[in-house]
Amino acid sequence: MKIAIVYNRESKAVINLFGIPNKEKYGMDTIMKVKNALLADNHRIRLFEGDKNIVENLERFMPKVTSGERPGLVFNLSYGIQGRGRYMHIPGILEMLGIPYVGSGPEVHAIALDKVVTKMVLIQKGIPTPKFAVLETPDSSLNEELRYPLIVKPKSEAVSFGLRIVKNEEELRSGVRTIHDEFASPTLVEEYIDGREVNIGLLGNAPTEVLPPLELLFEEGERIFTFADKTDHKASRVRSVCPAKLDDKLAEKLDELALKTFKALGCQDLARVDFRIDKKGNPYVLEVNSMASLGPDSSFVKAAAAKGLSYESLVQRIIHIAAERYFGIAKDLAPSEEEAGASLFSLITQARDKTETDLKQLTNLYTATGDAVSKQTFLRRLDARLKRLSLTLDEERTGGKSHWLYKTKKGLEEGTLLVVPIDDPGSRGAYPMPFRKEPEKLFGEGIASSRGGLAVVLRALESLQEANLLDGIPAGLFLYADEGHGMRYSAKHLQEAAKEAKEVLVMAPAFNEGSFISQRRGTMKVKIVIEGHPLRIGAKTKERSVLEYLLENVAALQEIAKEEPFLSLSVQDIDTTRYSILAPHRASVTIILSHLEEEKADQAFKKIQSCFSQKPKGIRTYLEILEKRPPLQKRKASLSLIEEIENMARQWKIPMREESTILPSAAGTIPAAIPVVCGMAPSSKRLYTPQESINRQELVQKTILLAQLLRKRHTS
């Protein structure tokens, strides 16, 4: 569940600062303890200051019922920034926004914070409370018949602000004047009950559980618990004992009165009722703390501990109690399959601009295949980001220059291996093409061949982390930097990593929009070098020039591919070397064989060798296989994975179909027994050209698809 912890610390983001400033605030240690307790319960947590920006922040973070998610909750730790009714500010805003929250409503806080109104409610309900009067100013008459000593405190303050004992008229007027000047508040004057002070914590709604009583023991000085006592943690004047040593009859009476008070004020989820017990054993309710402190040393937390609740368990219990009140859920707050998927969907779609900005930064960091320095610089930045995702580098499966394997906390075994190239293959001119946007496309150097898939992976993993799912997903990320060299160095290492995984998703671009790839051709790159004598142009000789010989045979090569389906031959990079005005004495050509069956490619290579075996006098030929990239044939092992991708795409209304393409990829390297699908990056246009682009909409769609697939692999 999404839970926002709202608190007040440093922010003074209001339109104007005036009135009574808040002196109550939680320490960051307590706020982080609450956060960690909720994280341990597998909730998605964000922290927000309770200022004027809270509406905008919660609107971005909180799910909407229309999105298919259960509404989130606010864990309210906010005492407000300023004003008399500051306890009510955040609950009131949350009521208006329609966001569930922990604790009592604004009307209850209004009553509890106003000690006079609280006492009037108590009297009406027949709950004993000390006799009292209200003095508006230091000069107001004390008309009630009250016996000294008396207690004076601000009418609408908390945590014992301004609390003191007065023993005569002079001290009374001094105390009232201090409260009037410091708090601009009327003074509550009540009879001091000389006796024991006991606090009763209450937890839950139907039923409400009474926590063990906690007694404050005063070692020296006046027997009252002041603000200084509460804030001076080194002071030893006041200590506590829980459970308090009470006889059964008195303990039962206190429990009964605490419950009656909780209900009389309409408290919800948790509260604390403070009692004084006179010498005769008569209990009196002093006040109600509708926002019982959750500080580690607070009375409420100590009482919960005496009940057997650790701090973590207490915080989790409070969330469950609030959720039960709103949603009728008593046990399991883990989101349903539908809710978890909808939450992830929202995270990704709401971060579209952020994803494009991220892609821009990745694209403008150019990493040519042959540029080792730029690749290492890029890897250092990427490594820091992956560490923030709690991914760790597998040193044994990593080669410092060609490949790197990262794993989630769950490890890669029986998990999903994501394969991403990080180099920009080929040379496309002196200046890399910068990132730019068009309504339907995103352009930039290597944006399709490398960066689009990487951006999809990073956003998917970050969204899963934000949803508190990533650590429970077995997965690995194989990065390689020799795509431009046909995976000459990394291929065998990818094969080994793949054997550890249950399935492989290759983040290469799809060819057509709305597609992924289950079949790819392989390639064989052959270089042919022909050497001969340097001949004079126009010389009458029976010797053949190397260029003539080459061109004749190249024409013959075209017939090789026509004999076999799913086999094509492409002539590339014809180059010559000559002296001055002499005819070329050296010529070379690169041949690319595209194939679906490696056996057919090997046969074609033998035919190429045969074409160049009949050499004229003075001609020498050399043939070398520069690169062999195996095909990805549609394999039986991948059928269930393909079906799952198609079903997931239908569920999230993402157009997606299976296709084949002639270009090779890392997918062909994966052993045949392992399920593998390629084309999980956004589809491309004009791949490997200066006008390379990806489909803008697919950047989000493929991220959703990948994240949802990984979510399904989550294990507890």
Image (tube, helix red, strand yellow):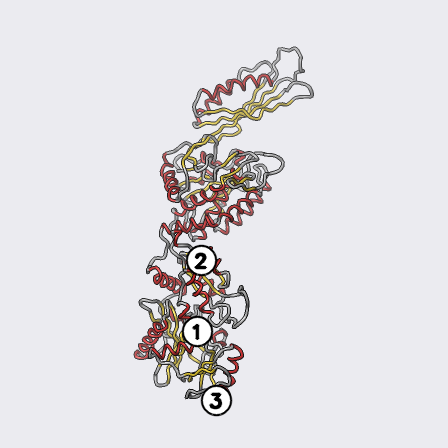
Instruction: Say what amino acid the circle numbered 1 marks.
Output: Leu
Spatial CA distance of label 3 from label 2 is: 53 Å
Dot in front, 1 or 2: 1
Tell me the residue that label 1 is attached to. Answer: 113
Instruction: Say what amino acid the circle numbered 3 marks.
Output: Asn
Tell me where residue 522 appears, x and y as whole percent: 46, 30
In front of the other: 126 or 202: 126
Q: Earlier in the sequence, mark 3 or mark 1?
A: 1
Spatial CA distance of label 1 from label 2 is: 29 Å
Q: Which mark is residue 158?
A: none
Tell me where residue 256 appears, x and y as whole percent: 32, 75
Tell me where residue 93 appears, x and y as whole percent: 45, 63
Tell me the residue that label 2 is attached to. Answer: 45
Secondary structure, mark 2, is: strand
In this orientation, does residue 256 appear? Answer: yes
Secondary structure, mark 3, is: loop
Asked if residue 129 lies left or right of residue 444, the reply is: left
Is residue 697 shown above or below 608?
below
Dot in front, 3 or 2: 3
Seen at 40% across and 84% down, the residue is: 131
Tell me the residue that label 3 is attached to. Answer: 168
In this orientation, does residue 409 appear? Answer: no
Hey, which residue is sitting farthest right in the picture? 580
Q: Earlier in the sequence, mark 3 or mark 2?
A: 2
Tell me where residue 158 appears, x and y as whole percent: 46, 74
